[in-house]
Amino acid sequence: MRKQPNRPKRYKTKPKDFAKAIEEGKVMQFYKSPQWIDLRKQALMRDKHECQRCNGKFCPAEQITLSEATEVHHIKGIKEYPELCLHLDNIVSLCHACHDHVEGRWVSNTSIKPQITREMW
């Protein structure tokens, strides 16, 4: 039997099952699924592997540049909106630095406290 070229992929797990798993705190089960891996690839191809924040297309950046997107980000968080976990419109391609910044893991240089004494070693 030949495989149909435009036939959609069939998966064992349905999106509503992922929503339930996310609500139960099993987020890694979702991120390791073939559905997420395929959707992630689709988002990166849609955005041409370019960081959308550095381009200025997703939330303002300090300077518009061109950088490679290596990660994807859920615009509406999956813990708050588990039903949107597999919607292509809810994810955006970002570089690692921008993803850390958007997620709140970024520390600016101004927030580092100055040293009181000079290091001597």
Image (cartoon, grey):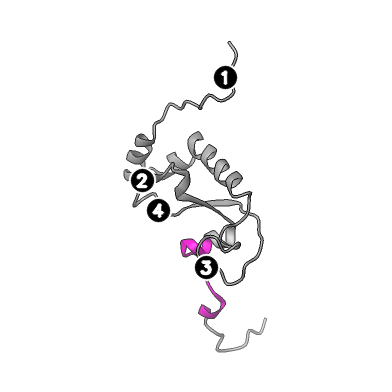
The mark that comes first in sequence, 1 or 4, is 1
Local SS, label 3: loop
Q: Where, quadrant-wise, is the N terminus in this rendering?
A: top right
Name the front one of labels 2 and 1. 1
The quadrant where residue 63 appears? bottom right
Local SS, label 1: loop
Evaluate if marks 1 and 4 touch, with contact meaning CB atoms under 8 Å apart: no
- At label 4, the amino acid type is Gly
The residue that disc 2 covers is: 82
Image position, residue 71 (x, y; %) = 56, 51
Q: CA distance from mark 2 to mark 3?
A: 26 Å
Magenta span = 100-112
The mark that comes first in sequence, 4 or 2, is 4
Residue nearer the viewer, 44 or 116: 44
Q: CA distance from mark 1 to mark 3?
A: 43 Å
- At label 3, the amino acid type is Pro
The residue that disc 3 covers is: 60
